[in-house]
Amino acid sequence: MLLHQDIELLTLSMDAVHFHLLGRFTDKKVNPKVGRAKKHAYFNLRDQGLAGGLWEDDSNVVPITDRQHQLHVFRYIGRHKDKGAWVWTFREGIYWPNSIGKRG
């Protein structure tokens, strides 16, 4: 869903409590795009057996100020893997693992 909205995604993490992403958006309409992506992810996970809710409704958008800030955020999101989150980076290509959604 994010790729279909012209977002250059660098990394993201998902767990039952948090959804973090780092990407370049083509315009300032970040919250609606992230909201659609979260909704899409929820329905994919529900179809795979997830019961109950997931994440909060609102998103906290923090613009990146410089390269050092970008690297800090990239590493911060990656560290969520240590807490059991599913983490993806641009290094893995554009297809999600089968446990998240179907390729195609």
Image: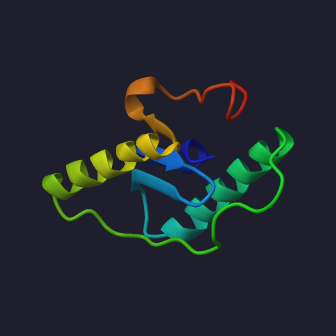
Where is residue 102, by image quadrant? top right
In the image, is residue 96 above or below residue 32? above
Looking at the picture, the colour scheme in use is: rainbow
Give the mark count: 0
In the image, is residue 88 above or below residue 65? above
- Residue drawn at x 41%, y 35% is 89
Residue placed most toward the observer, 28 or 56: 56
Residue placed most toward the observer, 40 or 53: 53
In the image, is residue 92 above or below residue 45? above
- Residue drawn at x 63%, y 55% is 16
- Residue drawn at x 63%, y 71% is 56
Q: Residue furthest front?
A: 83
Is residue 34 shown left or right of residue 78? right
In the image, is residue 51 above or below residue 101? below
Task: Name the quarter where the C terminus is drawn.
Answer: top right
Where in the figure is residue 55, as x and y percent of width and height?
64, 64
Is residue 97 shown left or right of residue 53? left
Where in the figure is residue 2, as x and y percent of width and height?
56, 48
Where in the figure is residue 94, as x and y percent of width and height?
52, 29
Where in the figure is residue 100, as x and y percent of width and height?
67, 35
Is residue 15 shown left or right of residue 49? left
Is residue 45 shown left or right of residue 32? right
